[in-house]
Amino acid sequence: MSFEAVTEAIRRESTPDTTERQRLEEVATTLRARATAAVTERVPDADVVQVGSTARNTWVSGDRDIDIFVRFPPETDRDTLERVGLEVGHETLPSGHEEYAEHPYVKGTYDGFDIDIVPCFRLERASDIRSAVDRTPFHNRYLDRRLDETLADDSRITKQFLKGIDVYGSDLRTAGFSGYLTELLVLEYGGFRPLLEAAADWHPPVELDPEDHGSASFDDPLVVIDPTDPTRNVAAVCSPANVARLQHYARAMLAEPTLKYFRPADPDPLEPSELETHLERRGATSLAIRFDTPDLVDDQLYPQLYKSLDGIARGLDARGFDVLRKTTMAADTAVLLFDLGVPRRPKIERHEGPPVHVRDHAEGFFAAYVDDDSVYGPFIDGDRYVVERERTCTSALEFLESPRLFDVSLGAHVETALDDGYTVLVDDELTDLLEDFGPALRRYFEPTP
Amino acid sequence: MSFEAVTEAIRRESTPDTTERQRLEEVATTLRARATAAVTERVPDADVVQVGSTARNTWVSGDRDIDIFVRFPPETDRDTLERVGLEVGHETLPSGHEEYAEHPYVKGTYDGFDIDIVPCFRLERASDIRSAVDRTPFHNRYLDRRLDETLADDSRITKQFLKGIDVYGSDLRTAGFSGYLTELLVLEYGGFRPLLEAAADWHPPVELDPEDHGSASFDDPLVVIDPTDPTRNVAAVCSPANVARLQHYARAMLAEPTLKYFRPADPDPLEPSELETHLERRGATSLAIRFDTPDLVDDQLYPQLYKSLDGIARGLDARGFDVLRKTTMAADTAVLLFDLGVPRRPKIERHEGPPVHVRDHAEGFFAAYVDDDSVYGPFIDGDRYVVERERTCTSALEFLESPRLFDVSLGAHVETALDDGYTVLVDDELTDLLEDFGPALRRYFEPTP
């Protein structure tokens, strides 16, 4: 298929039809009216705005999120905002429940749509914001004024592409591209194709500043200065791997356009016999720590899982158990999985001292070990003192099963969960994970970009 | 003991007594006369000089080397020098045999002394030399004029110290301090104690230039510009470890003077039960390659053994079999011994590609592997492509026993010897080495500075 044929097909399927638009508009109108009535009766100067892609006509057909922001005057105190905000939320959406982001808010469903009723401050400038949600109405206004019908189409196509290649979403599990970031990129480059052509040639760090007002510097591979806030990188959450993934698939899509890149992968669960084949073919040592998943929302859980995964991997590497690859997955139980190149080390380890000519350090090192019968040496190798000392940990399994596991950097709730108990599965025992994590294990053992 | 008491004791035992001096002088006089008669009858303008420590009164009591240099006029052609040199050698020392250094020469014993009769060119300046032996008479003259009785005493003490700590000798097995270098250092610093005090504080590279005429630069830890040749580092052969060793023992001798540092270690052979204890305590994998020692003089053999030891160690390290320690030893058979931290690796290895944003390389890497069913990936890790590919070598023993051993850098004659056959001993099998290498194995398993 040609590039144009593919994008035209995606444009057609991602653009909501008249029925979908009407149904959404009816629901949104009803809820905005209810929220306006509920809030002005309590705070006459407050107002209500709808934000997000369903407000901007950039949602992908089938998306069902309606975000209603209830804006309080800036002089409102925070307690009032939170209390009245929840009252308005419940009155607008009686079946909803409370959740907590930066403020508490009400979330629920209505007529098949996912509804958020979020209180915020109504401010003059985005730079005056008191919490991240206050910024959202500014984002909405910025894009709404600039995205014409063609760019709105391309925003939908781009979102579908990012979904297809599994990098869409600024939640902390995905660490990918938010809807706002996606639309800014489409706006900046002038469409889906020019965005792909640019991304294919990016040399991170890539720095975009649509309003040319950036006033801070960032360490991220992709920097898009928020047009409504010169101090914020809209792409801050975007991981290096996801930027690289966009570059990879941008090139792939330009070289050989196909609908496949717009279809999220939905792998079959890995079968026990396939797992066995992989373990045999790899010949590595696979160790999986399994424990009860801490009761946290994903945006709190995944950063803790990633932190723990990195901390334990560094702990394993530091002890010489070379980590080849690693991943984490979570359902009712959570898993930290490591493939090791070296599962065991000798009883001794080489410990290099200072060069003999660095007299103070060298004399200190020599004095520290010369009468220590537990070490080999000190001897001289090259220009340094060296000893071979006892290793505290000669087996990776032993390390993971010992209290020393808690010496590494772990997410706080993961640490508590591990403290409550965990098991370590070795090689064939990974079969126990297939029931809950079959598709994730196929992704791990059959990796793609 | 005080420093002075120790050095006085060593001075007394290392200074030849009158009887030793007289006996040596008688022999030297006889041989000089014979050589002079033999050469002037053939080349009237030639002459004879005695060189080396026995000519300079700096030999350590018990040393029995007498070096007679037969100097031919510079216009002599090389063939004549070699032919007449050998004739003179044989006539001077009828029981001698021919050896080959830079020229052929005659070597043998006479009345209990080890004699060399060496032909060389008699030149105006050391910089005119045609071969290294031509330089020796210049060295002799330089030191002879400058070493008084006290410095001669200190030269002997220093030599005995360097022998005691096993760094005396510029042969390529020892890679230590030559007699000439030792005397230059004593002269430069003004004695044994000032030399130790300086060495204890050396910060390599240490550069000494007694005649302040150096005209070349060197990459060695110790540089002593030859007073008779501005382009030569007298300490070029000195290894970093031996410089460090001198520094270590200089500090030790100054801190706690003892006769022990002047007594070369003479370790008992390691016992089988001790070897077993060490192997168990270390828990490493010990692999020893054993083969028939190539028929070479030590100055050719040891550089080849060291080169092969380094080459194989690099080969093992590059394949992930971390070398903890290594050594070589030679008698009728030669041994290359390695202690490994990792004897085996998985069937796959991680192979990092370029960052995805380096488009040309990244596309090339991806294209090279995307259809390769033998690898895992390519996938993206951080900002790079990565594949896991089959490892060519999963066992260190297998590597040492395979033809791939010959892919590493080996000494030429060692390569030939290995090609003729070798065995690899693993762990307990090292017992087979105890009969020939018992003391060397004790040095290896009980290392000191």
Image (tube, coloured by chain):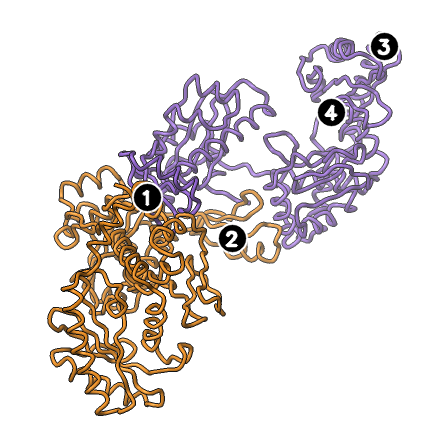
Chain colours: A purple, B orange
Numbered disc in front, either 2 or 3: 3
What is the chain identity of the residue bearing mark 4?
A
Above/below status of A45 relative to B134: above
Kind of residue at disc 1 = Ala
Question: What secondary structure is found at the residue carrying circle 1?
Answer: helix
| Residue nearer the viewer, A13 or A90 | A90
1 and 4 marks in contact (CB < 8 Å): no
Q: Residue at x 73, y 13 (%)?
A: A93
What is the chain identity of the residue bearing mark 2?
B
- Is the same chain shared between marks 1 and 4? no
**Residue A417: image x %, image y %?**
47, 19
Q: Is residue B7 visible?
A: yes
**Residue A377: image x %, image y %?**
30, 41
Quadrant showing the N terminus of chain B: top left
Q: Residue at x 68, y 42 (%)?
A: A222
Q: Residues within 10 Å of mark 1 (few under 14, many from 20)?
A: some
Numbered disc in front, either 4 or 3: 4
Kind of residue at disc 4 = Ala
On the image, numbered disc 3 is attached to which residue? A43
On the image, numbered disc 2 is attached to which residue? B370
C-alpha distance separating marks 1 and 3 = 86 Å
C-alpha distance separating marks 2 and 1 = 62 Å
Question: In which quarter of the view is residue A378 placed?
Answer: top left
Q: Residues within 10 Å of mark 3 (few under 14, many from 20)?
A: some
Numbered disc in front, either 2 or 1: 1
Question: What secondary structure is found at the residue carrying circle 3?
Answer: loop
Residue A132, numbered label: 4
C-alpha distance separating marks 2 and 3 = 62 Å
